Image: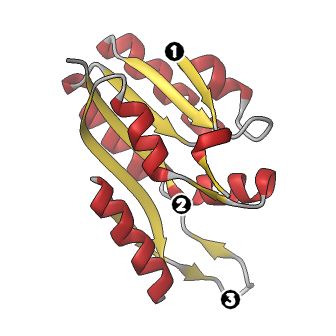
């Protein structure tokens, strides 16, 4: 059975799904969809921790599905802007994992990951799958992935 590692960029999924559809992303449907293609042997969800109870409930739902939830504190800068970026952490984890699986699935539309998908495919021979919102997923990421899956239909919580 094919071994799959799953990486979910929670912030990217939240904002792109909300912008495009005005609803939430269905992580249970994502898990079920990927499970049809093999065994999920590693799964990480990367989120920002604001410490509110609704968010903690959501994080527990992710854990119950099988995700290891990685949190970074929400940082509010003095100029009013906010920081909470997991790109480097996601990249390190994918690089560490790619040699031990057959497929890497990235749920994010962030074009910053295009070079990462290209590198792990060439270096480790893994298949790469990108899940992203149509129109809000970087074309470079779509091109870099072995397979692109648009986030629509059953992947949405309406």
| Mark 1, residue position | 146
Which numbered disc flags the more N-terminal residue, 3 or 1?
Answer: 3
Q: How far apart are marks 3 and 1 (CA)?
A: 42 Å
Q: Which residue is drawn at 36% across and 22% down?
A: 37
Question: Quarter of the image holding residue 41?
Answer: top left
Indicate left or right for 56 with 96 as reference: right
**Residue at image coords 60%, 38%:** 112
Q: Distance between the residues labelled 2 and 3?
A: 17 Å
Q: Nearer the viewer, residue 104 or 92?
A: 104
Res 68 visible: no
Name the residue carrying label 2.
Answer: 85
Q: Which of marks 2 and 3 is in front?
A: 2
Residue holding disc 3: 78
Which is nearer the eye, 63 or 114?
63
Q: Where is residue 113 in the image (x, y as percent from the top left)?
A: 54, 35
Q: Which of marks 2 and 1 is nearer the N terminus?
A: 2
On screen, 19 above or below 74?
Answer: above
What is the crowding at mark 2: few (fewer than 14 residues within 10 Å), some, or many (at least 20)? Answer: some
Circles 2 and 1 in contact, beta carbons < 8 Å: no
Mark 3: secondary structure: loop
Indicate the position of residue 27 as horizontal and vertical percent values. 47, 51
> What residue is rendered at 34% in x and 32% in y?
35
Give the distance between the C-alpha atoms of the residues marked 2 and 1, in whole angstroms: 25 Å
Residue 142 versus residue 59 in the image, above or below? above
Q: Which corner quadrant holds the C terminus?
A: bottom right
Dividing the picture into quadrants, the one containing residue 69 is bottom left
Q: Position of residue 68 (x, y in %)?
A: 28, 57
Badge 1 element: loop
């Amino acid at each position: 059975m094919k071994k799959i590692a799953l990486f979910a960029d929670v912030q990217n999924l939240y904002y792109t799904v909300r912008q495009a559809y005005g609803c939430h992303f269905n992580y249970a449907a994502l898990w079920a969809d990927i499970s049809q293609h093999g065994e999920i042997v590693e799964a990480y969800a990367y989120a920002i921790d604001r410490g509110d109870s609704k968010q903690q409930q959501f994080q527990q739902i992710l854990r119950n599905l099988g995700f290891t939830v990685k949190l970074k504190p929400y940082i509010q800068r003095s100029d009013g802007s906010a920081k909470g970026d997991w790109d480097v952490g996601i990249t390190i984890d994918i690089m560490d994992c790619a040699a031990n699986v057959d497929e890497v699935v990235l749920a994010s539309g962030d074009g910053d990951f295009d070079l990462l998908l290209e590198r792990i495919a060439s270096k480790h021979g893994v298949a790469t799958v990108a899940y992203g919102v149509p129109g809000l997923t970087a074309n470079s990421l779509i091109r870099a992935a072995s397979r692109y899956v648009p986030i629509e239909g059953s992947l949405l919580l309406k």
